[in-house]
Amino acid sequence: MFSSWIFTFCLCWTLVHGGLHLIGSSQPIVAAPGDDVILPCRMDPEWNAVGKTVEWSRPDLRPSGPQKRVEYVFVYRFRKTDRDMMMDTYIQRTSLSQDGLRRGDVSLTIRNVSLQDQGRFRCFIPRLGIEAELLLVVDPNFVSTTTTETVPGRNFIIPTPQEETSRSGWVRFHLCLVVFSFFIICLGLVSVCVIRKWQQIQK
């Protein structure tokens, strides 16, 4: 009986966490050299990511150094920035929002972008095994038409809402329904086993 409860709990845990995924932008994020830009990425549904490892990398760059490790743009783990894992050029220019992390928002801010920043970026949460990729285009002829706010010496660009892939509410409802149904079935099976064992003892 105890093992059945453990099995049920593990299955529920897997299904709930299996429903989490990252949403980025299906359209390129465009900026001009010198701009500050946000690469949007968030968890759906919302999930507190403060204590989780978050990795931003450049998959289109070849790993350098003797270890041939991934080119990390930003690494957040143990509730702080891990600068030892990051590329030197991004250490002083990248950040995540602490408040955003509490809501599952792992969007990356890059300050003072240059032509060298152009390319694909990947956000990855190792514990959950989920990732999202998006493209940053740095165009010298780009004129911002997005929402901006003043930051000393720079423009802070907040991308307009992009087309996103998301699950509708009924999918989540059906997931919960499946979990609940499985729980009821397991409970019924356990009850039948207990009743049969009790009947055998009575005989």
Image (cartoon, rainbow, N blue to C red):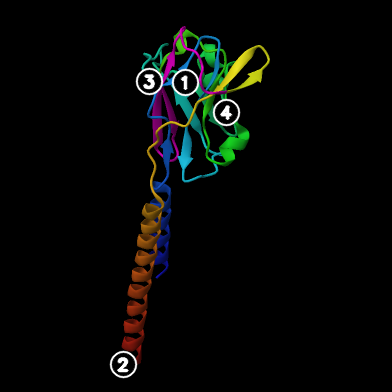
Q: For mark 2, what is the residue? A: 203
Residue type at mark 2 is: Lys
Question: Mark 1 or mark 2, which is nearer the start of the sequence?
Answer: 1
Q: Are marks 3 and 4 in contact (CB under 8 Å)?
A: no
Mark 1 and mark 3: span between their CA atoms? Answer: 9 Å
Q: Which residue is mark 4?
A: 96
Distance, label 2 to label 1, CA atoms, is: 68 Å
The correct choice, above or below, for 47 with respect to 120 in the image is: below
Q: Secondary structure at mark 1?
A: strand
Q: Which quadrant, please, contains the C terminus?
A: bottom left
Disc 1 marks which residue?
Answer: 72
- What amino acid is labelled 3 in the image? Pro
The magenta region covers: 120-147
- Residue closest to the eye, 140 or 2: 140
Q: Earlier in the sequence, mark 1 or mark 3?
A: 3
Residue 89 lies, in percent from the top left, at 53, 11
Helix, strand or loop at mark 4: loop
Closer to the eye: label 2 or 3 = 3
Kindly check if marks 2 and 3 are in contact, taking CB atoms under 8 A apart as contact.
no
141, above or below 28, in the image = above
